[in-house]
Image (spheres, rainbow, N blue to C red):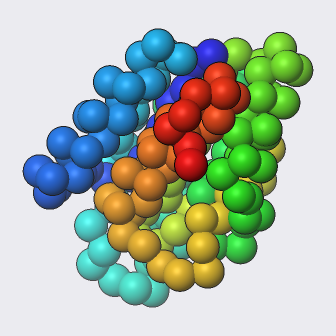
Amino acid sequence: MNIKIIAVGKIKEQYLKDAIKEYEKRLAPFCSFSTVEVQAEQINDEALCEKYKELEADRILQAIKQGSYIITLEIKGRMFSSEMFAQKIKDISNQGINDVSFIIGGANGLHQKVTNISHLKLSFSNMTFTHQMIRLLLVEQIYRSFKINANEPYHR
């Protein structure tokens, strides 16, 4: 399975970069994993928020592989337990889908043209996390799902 995280903006803190890199390394036996960082718009005028989101959306859409199963991270998305998330990953694979794209929007969220093409809207919590922090949480949960599906002892 090919898994790609498409995220608006870059990871700035080294400790987050290091943690994400560790999980990327751990994922190697289970899948082909990649991250695409698209440029975030500089917020100069709150009144232009939708325009900023649309510009970011155009960059996101260019990074999605045709035929990919698209999972957007959204506040109002569906919440899963780790076991349920692992089952969802397994179900996607069992459907013969080989490419999954997780999309993390920018500070203003995702434009409607991205959420409209999403196959699954995923929420990690009712709480708000930084976009950098959620990338770490996401890659860890992807790794955990593969360990659960392989019946390996990481998930306890």
Quadrant occupied by the N terminus: top right
Residue at the location (18% across, 42% down)? 18
- Measured as percent of width and height from the top left, residue 154 is found at 50, 38
- Measured as percent of width and height from the top left, residue 25 is found at 32, 24
- Image label count: 0
Residue at the location (50% across, 63% down)? 53
Residue at the location (30% across, 42% down)? 20
- Measured as percent of width and height from the top left, residue 148 is found at 65, 35
Q: Is residue 101 visible?
A: no
Q: Is residue 90 above or below residue 104?
A: above
Which of the 4 image quadrants contains residue 43?
A: bottom left
Q: Is residue 80 above or below residue 140?
A: below
Which of the 4 image quadrants contains residue 69?
A: top right
Residue closest to the eye, 10 or 132 = 132
Please give left or right for residue 50 compared with residue 27 in the image: right
Residue closest to the eye, 127 or 116 = 127
Residue at the location (77% across, 21% down)? 93
Q: Is residue 20 visible?
A: yes
